[in-house]
Image (spheres, grey):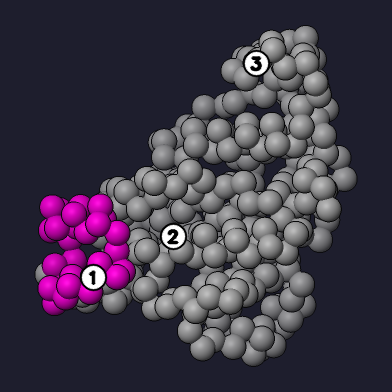
Amino acid sequence: MTETTKTHVILLSCGSFNPITKGHIQMFERARDYLHKTGRFIVIGGIVSPVHDSYGKQGLVSSRHRLTMCQLAVQSSDWIRVDPWECYQDTWQTTCSVLEHHRDLMKRVTGCILSNVNTPSMTPVIGQPQNESPQPIYQNSNVSNKPTAAKILGKVGESLSRICCVRPPMERFTFVDENANLGTVMRYEEIELRILLLCGSDLLESFCIPGLWNESDMEVIVGDFGIVVVPRDGTDTERIMNHSSILRKYKNNILVVKDDVNHPMSVVSSTKSRLALQHGDGHVVDYLSQPVIDYILKSQLYINASG
């Protein structure tokens, strides 16, 4: 497979991130490594989307704090970003609506036709939208060859860094071919761009709990978008998938991360990190990065919390 024929992926993780742990970031890295090793995908970005305050989970601290902790946790990453859209809405948003928001946002930002799992787009286009005043923010007069997929991905990545970590309304970005006359619609090399939900096997298992998820939402999440699952210790993902008719139906859209390294996925647990904080346990450094720990101590979060 050439770079242009591989599926280009943005990983989206939704959750409380109360607080965000080293394990959450590890999940992104493991998923990216695995998808690259399959030879079918190129991961061009990761998005952390903290849940709205009205989610109502016991012990959930303000989104103001959770957003800050998430930003501190990814500050050294060159491809994972934090997006505040969920937190800035009037009320709690479903995972399905968050995925649809980011799909629509990427359409507007890149001009690219995003594909679904079962209906890949045959002619995705990244270019300047018609009937809009051109705003040439990407130009390089020294480049004379046709834009490559790598250049396009660079532009998408640059846009990701701009659209994340800022409060809506988002600035609209127009991609302009270096050699095009302004105002001309340009067709770039065809690429397939997809947003996949990144989750742990505990979320996958929750799909099997009757009445917990709206079935039409599950159809969209697994059937249209697809998910990447990072298993937790000892979890039988095959058994979980066979326990749900929807998961069985869209089994091919569920990518289970498999690698040869024994990762202690217990470090993903926000609950264990909060308990370590409350008990003054020095092992909290196993769960949380130092900038996040420093922020928690400075803001006196979780110390006296019961959740």
Crowding around mark 3 (Cα neighbors within 10 Å: few <14, some 14 to 19, many 20+) is: few
Query: Is residue 249 at all visible to an observer of this figure?
Result: yes
Which kind of residue does numbered mark 1 sit on? Answer: Val
Q: Mark 1 or mark 3, which has the lower sequence index?
A: 3
Taking 282 as reference, is 99 above or below it?
above
Measuring from the top left, give residue 106's x and y in whole percent: 63, 40
Taking 70 as reference, is 202 above or below it?
below
User: Which residue lies at the image location 17% right of the left edge and 72% below the top edge?
Assistant: 282
Question: Closest to the observer: 141 or 303?
Answer: 141
Which residue is label 1 attached to? Answer: 284
Question: Closest to the observer: 44 or 237?
Answer: 44
Residue 215 shown in magenta: no
C-alpha separation, residue under disc 1 versus residue under disc 3: 47 Å
Measuring from the top left, give residue 205's x and y in whole percent: 55, 81
Which residue is label 2 attached to? Answer: 25
Which kind of residue does numbered mark 3 sit on? Answer: Gln
